[in-house]
Image (cartoon, rainbow, N blue to C red):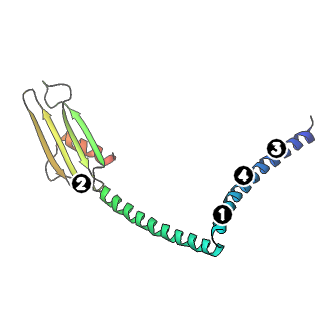
Amino acid sequence: MGIPFLAWLVTCFILLAWLVFLTMSVRGLQRRHRVVSEAARRENLSDTILRFAEDVQSLQGRLEGLESAQREMADCLRSTIQKVGLVRFDAFEDVGGKLSFAVAFLDDHGDGVVVSSINGRRETRIYAKPIRKGESIYALSAEERGALARAMSRGV
């Protein structure tokens, strides 16, 4: 086998690939032609084109309605819980297992609430503090600040 034979073989392979590509393109065109021919057989070509144009206009109107609805949903979603941060900790030395926790629930604007649960041997206390734009008017514990920082740094 010499270089001319390899060149001929590569050329044949390229031509074969090109033939396959052209065959697939022709099949696609034939399919489209069949659809148009079938529609033209049922009614004249100008009526078919007018009907297709009306269909396109109708679809454009529906698409605009869907885009509007999508924008409304996106606006609503901005005020839903999107960011959550959780910190578990031992509130007391005699109680282990990290049963106490602070969790922050925030929307896209950083508004929401931090909920803390302090678990002791005999009682559990739960606190909720409102959050506006990532800050609270109430003093936050280190764990609550940690939960808030985790929530602010990521979304759900």
Q: Which residue is mark 2?
A: 111
Q: Position of residue 72 (x, y in %)?
A: 34, 62
- Mark 2–mark 4 contact, CB under 8 Å? no
Residue at 23% x, 45% y is: 104
- Mark 4–mark 3 contact, CB under 8 Å? no
State the quadrant of the N terminus. Answer: top right
Cα distance between the residues tagged 3 and 2: 63 Å
Instruction: Tell which circle, 2 or 4, labels the residue nearer the N-terminal end.
Output: 4
Query: In the drawing, what numbered circle is on residue 13?
Result: 3
Between circles 3 and 1, the one closer to the viewer is 1
Between circles 1 and 2, the one closer to the viewer is 1
Between circles 2 and 4, the one closer to the viewer is 4
Decide if residue 30 is on the left or right side of residue 83: right
Instruction: Tell which circle, 1 or 2, labels the residue nearer the N-terminal end.
Output: 1
Answer few, some or many: residues within 10 Å of disc 2's Cα (few below 14, many 20 plus, some between 14 and 19). many
Amino acid bearing label 3 = Phe
Residue at 26% x, 39% y is: 86
Amino acid bearing label 1 = Glu
Cα distance between the residues tagged 1 and 4: 21 Å
Query: In the drawing, what numbered circle is on residue 18?
Result: none
Q: Position of residue 41 (x, y in %)?
A: 67, 67
Q: Which residue is mark 4?
A: 24
Cα distance between the residues tagged 3 and 1: 38 Å
Q: Which of 5/118 is in front?
A: 5
Element at badge 1?
A: helix
Cα distance between the residues tagged 1 and 2: 59 Å
Q: Which residue is mark 1?
A: 38
Between circles 4 and 3, the one closer to the viewer is 4
Answer few, some or many: residues within 10 Å of disc 4's Cα (few below 14, many 20 plus, some between 14 and 19). few
Element at badge 3?
A: helix
Amino acid bearing label 4 = Met
